[in-house]
Image: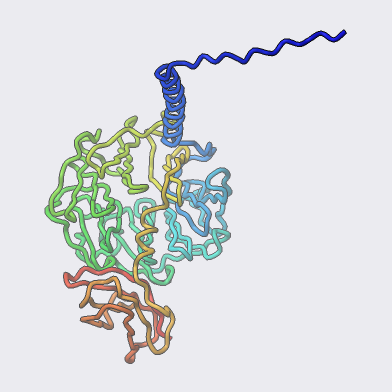
Amino acid sequence: MKVPTQPCAPPTFHPRPSTLLLQEINEMMMYRYAWFALLGLLHVAALANWTPSNLTSTGHKSMTTHNGALYLATFNTGVQKSVDNGVSWTLVNSGLPLTEGTIKVQSVGSNGTTLFCGTESGIYRSTNHGASWSIANGTLTANASTYVNKIYNFNGVLFVVFSGMSSNSNGGVFRTVDNGTTWLSAYNGLSTNMTIYNIDMMDGVLYASTNTALMKSADLGQSWSQVGTTNYAVYAVQGIGGRIVALTTFGARYSIDNGVTWVNSTNYPVASPPAGSELLAYDSKFYAITRSGPIGCYRSSDGGETWEVFNTGLSAPNTFVQEEFHSSGSTLFIICALDVYSTPGSTVGLPEQEVAVTPKPYPTVFTEGFKIDLSNSEPGSTVILVDATGREVMRFGNLALGVVPFERNGLAAGTYQCFLADHRGDRLHLGQVVAQ
């Protein structure tokens, strides 16, 4: 017998009031956004931390990037190389001199084609990525008190800064355009009692911090003059985006008019920074080594106007022994005597971007002449050729915009540095050309 089925009653819906539903949705959205915000803050905090390399060596001095690898100058143990962005390191000391059983390397740098390091026995170079080194000191001298303390590359010209005062025999700054075969003095205009601490380039002008004034050079180190009224000690200088920041005997200062006038930073932690203080412009920020014990590293995100402590992740001893900064692509390094630390950035190094927009002569090796695209330059500018001794040998004036040809006109065979000068006389280094 079949039992008749009862029809199922339709389900009863009880819609919630729209205001209640919206309230719950809003609460869920706020909850989710709160988590996203927290994760974002944690992510930013993680990016703001320094990560140690956990090196077992000590006495680290400086770092450079060459052919995609990192090179670290380490006093007493020589030069170390890393091909994995600082995760692991190997010694590359073949050819470097031993002094009392140790390899006393004070600095390391690169001009893009050749590696250089400064030792207490002189300047050494490597043309095979650190596999071997040879002396490249020329007529320069070095010892335990006067040695190459800094190495810079500006538009393909290598500069070395000695630890001693500017003079013919006791230090100063020198440059080379032939990979260290010859060295040219680059201290004309610097007094003999000046000790140069570091150099930076902004808009084609070199700035040098010294123990008596801030100096500048518009002709790639051939001559120097004082910046404004900065007749006081300047221990570090960096420029970015038309703004110069300096650590001076009167504290941290910044200028937005090329050093004519200066404004004091409001909260830099050291009223009178000592010698050895450092600055680096990177990732649209300024980073500072205070050289003041536990104060350690500071950072400015507003062009040097205000500063914040930036030591998270550094071991306590390494806030006392910070040496230099180095930027390599999207990574910033701080070199400490006891270890090397890194933190990620969001951009590539700013100096690399500035070089990329500079007009370049082509072909760089020529027989009849070369050309330069001056389409984006100032009309009426001048191109100047300078030989290996620093002497001006040819000048082409009142140039039009566009691609401009330059005839050889009896120019002797050799290597020449090419500069572009505007109506004010300021010079921009465009590179080098070789007349065959």
Q: Does residue 53 appear to the left or right of 292 in the view shown? A: right
Residue at 34% across, 67% down: 358
**Display colour scheme:** rainbow
| Image position, residue 305 (x, y; %) | 22, 40
Q: Does residue 398 appear to the left or right of 143 in the view shown? A: left
Quarter of the picture containing the N terminus is top right
Above or below residue 134? Residue 37 is above
Above or below residue 152? Residue 289 is above
- Residue lying farthest to the right in this orientation: 1
Above or below residue 237? Residue 168 is below
| Image position, residue 111 (x, y; %) | 43, 63
Residue at 30% across, 63% down: 169
Residue at 51% across, 14% down: 14
* Total numbered badges shown on the rendered structure: 0
Residue at 85% across, 10% down: 2
Q: Does residue 51 appear to the left or right of 296 in the view shown? A: right
Residue 388 visible? The answer is no
Residue 310 visible? The answer is yes
Quarter of the picture containing the C terminus is bottom left
| Image position, residue 417 (x, y; %) | 34, 75
Give the quarter of the image for residue 119.
bottom left
| Image position, residue 342 (x, y; %) | 46, 41
Nearest the eye: 64 or 133: 64
Nearest the eye: 417 or 389: 417
